[in-house]
Image: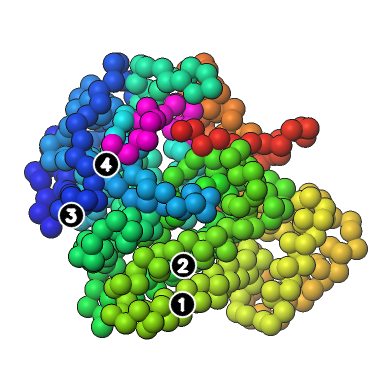
């Protein structure tokens, strides 16, 4: 693919998505804001992408992040897609975002550069296309924490304030997030093509996804079946990683599931404290559709919708296409369970496989739910032998379980120190605790004090370090009568 000349800032933008059929996007003019200021810049990410940090901090650099200036090589556009939102199918698109282009790093990596909160588009559906500072900083914190935890995710490059207010329930300071992604091609992109596009357009976006994310399989005999299978594998691995750290996405609509296998769209997301599969934080998920325990089956449901959209490409015979799709989707549960079991074994320091491992894990989780144990801190305590710090300590069930766990550890050939290292590498010392995130956001938004947020980011940057400073951030919030709620920020 052709690239553009690298500018002084380091932007090296290409526009491969814009070479898809016009139905997949709308070219946009910028929606400038009055007085943008840089709130936070991800210098580590910028440097890794070959960008000049000082130039990004300049007036011209901030103007790009604000959507006031088009960098060399950019071709701003809003993507069209569809999606099942809480089970209901809708025609959608980037209602408050624009894609500047794809940055090519000095190592040849390709990343979408998207501005979120950049103003109205043809897909805004009556919205103002803007975003508030709090939700944009929230996405910055959580996405960077997810990256540090080793979970595939979009990244946050910068947040700028716009100098303008937006009206939601109250008047809020406006902001724009610069998001970096492997791409923004979604399950909903394929649903859009299948519902409103031609066969050629569906094939075009499938070929694009193959070229961009799965080039090794584009020569397969049935490359579209291979694409379906690979997306299923990546999503199974991704959801397993979510479950293993207690992450709850909050809005697992099909337009929020990427073909690349990255976590995307951090709206009412949060991390679970007390272990309970029914945990829901999102204020709009009143039925618990996207509760923690429902995330694996919902992922399977979303992938079934992806398979449906791919049917015309899988086989010319409809019945045969359906069979191929069903066979591929039927693999999801086993793939997810295998990925999750591998991960949970590591959290317990277990090598190899034994038939009773699954029941050993289920017994532990059942106890954690019964005694309202903190998910992250329980595994952390087990890692360092500080069992007295868990809500399980002193119970007959835990004593019996602990004997079984120790017996299982004793049957493996790996040393105790090797097992402990596996646990340290698999159980984070810290997660972005909800109360810590809220304190950081309040200081930044209400007082203009970013020091709390920056310190939180520093602590979250290496979650497996298990430093004394991180211990301070592992404490639980005070008990409250009201449940913690998150909001999508639209």
Between 202 and 16, the one lying in front of the other is 202
Q: Residues within 10 Å of mark 4 (few under 14, many from 20)?
A: many
Proximity of marks 1 and 2: CB atoms separated by less than 8 Å: no
Question: What's the CA distance linking mark 3 and mark 4?
Answer: 13 Å
Question: What's the CA distance linking mark 3 and mark 2?
Answer: 25 Å
The residue sitting at 19% across, 40% down in the picture is 27
Between 358 and 292, the one lying in front of the other is 292
The residue sitting at 37% across, 51% down in the picture is 82
The residue sitting at 69% across, 39% down in the picture is 475
Q: Residues within 10 Å of mark 3 (few under 14, many from 20)?
A: some
Q: Tag on residue 304?
A: 2
In magenta stretch: residue 239: no
Q: Residues within 10 Å of mark 2 (few under 14, many from 20)?
A: many
Q: Is 417 left or right of 197, judged from the image as shown?
A: right
Between 273 and 191, the one lying in front of the other is 191
Q: Tag on residue 326?
A: 1
Question: What's the CA distance linking mark 4 and mark 1?
Answer: 33 Å
Residue identified by numbered label 3: 21
- Per the image, label 2 sits on a secondary structure element best described as helix
Residue identified by numbered label 4: 78
The answer to whether residue 149 is seen in the rendering is no
Question: What's the CA distance linking mark 1 and mark 3?
Answer: 29 Å
The answer to whether residue 22 is seen in the rendering is yes
- x and y, in percent, of residue 140 in the image: 44, 37
Between 158 and 106, the one lying in front of the other is 158
Q: Tag on residue 143?
A: none
Question: What's the CA distance linking mark 1 and mark 2?
Answer: 8 Å
Q: Which residues are magenta?
A: 122-138
Residue 188 found in image quarter: bottom left
- Per the image, label 1 sits on a secondary structure element best described as helix
């Amino acid at each position: 693919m052709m690239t553009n000349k690298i500018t002084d800032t380091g932007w090296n933008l290409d526009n491969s998505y814009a070479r898809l059929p016009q139905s997949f996007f709308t070219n946009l003019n910028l929606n400038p804001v009055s007085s943008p200021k840089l709130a936070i810049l991800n210098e580590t990410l910028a440097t890794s992408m070959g960008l000049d940090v000082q130039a990004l901090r300049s007036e011209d650099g901030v103007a790009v992040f604000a959507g006031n200036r088009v960098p060399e090589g950019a071709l701003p556009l809003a993507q069209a897609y569809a999606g099942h939102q809480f089970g209901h199918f809708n025609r959608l698109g980037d209602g408050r975002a624009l894609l500047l282009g794809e940055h090519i790093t000095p190592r040849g990596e390709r990343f979408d550069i998207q501005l979120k909160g950049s103003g109205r588009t043809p897909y805004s559906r009556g919205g103002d296309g803007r975003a508030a500072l709090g939700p944009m900083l929230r996405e910055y914190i959580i996405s960077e924490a997810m990256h540090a935890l080793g979970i595939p995710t979009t990244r946050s490059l910068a947040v700028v304030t716009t100098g303008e207010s937006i009206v939601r329930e109250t008047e809020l300071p406006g902001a724009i997030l610069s998001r970096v992604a492997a791409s923004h091609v979604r399950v909903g992109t394929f649903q859009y093509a299948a519902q409103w596009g031609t066969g050629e357009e569906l094939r075009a976006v499938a070929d694009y996804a193959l070229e961009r994310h799965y080039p090794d399989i584009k020569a397969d005999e049935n490359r579209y079946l291979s694409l379906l299978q690979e997306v299923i594998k990546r999503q199974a691995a991704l959801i397993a990683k979510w479950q293993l750290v207690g992450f709850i996405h909050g809005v697992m609509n099909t337009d929020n599931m990427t073909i690349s296998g990255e976590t995307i769209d951090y709206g009412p997301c949060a991390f679970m404290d007390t272990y309970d599969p029914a945990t829901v934080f999102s204020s709009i998920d009143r039925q618990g559709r996207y509760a923690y325990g429902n995330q694996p089956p919902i992922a399977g449901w979303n992938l079934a919708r992806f398979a449906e959209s791919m049917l015309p490409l899988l086989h010319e015979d409809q019945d045969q296409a359906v069979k191929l799709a069903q066979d591929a989707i039927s693999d999801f549960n086993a793939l997810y369970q295998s990925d999750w079991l591998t991960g949970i074994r590591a959290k317990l320091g277990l090598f190899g496989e034994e038939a009773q491992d699954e029941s050993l894990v289920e017994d532990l989780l059942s106890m954690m739910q019964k005694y309202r144990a903190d998910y992250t801190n329980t595994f952390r305590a087990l890692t360092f032998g500080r069992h007295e710090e868990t809500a399980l300590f002193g119970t007959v069930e835990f004593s019996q379980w602990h004997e079984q766990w120790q017996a299982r550890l004793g049957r493996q050939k790996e040393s105790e120190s090797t097992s402990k290292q596996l646990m340290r590498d698999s159980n984070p010392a810290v997660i972005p605790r909800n109360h810590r995130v809220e304190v950081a956001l309040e200081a930044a938004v209400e007082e203009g004090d970013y020091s709390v947020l920056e310190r939180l980011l520093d602590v979250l940057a290496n979650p497996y370090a298990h430093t004394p400073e991180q211990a301070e951030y592992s404490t639980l919030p005070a008990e409250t009568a009201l449940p913690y709620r998150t909001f999508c920020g639209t």
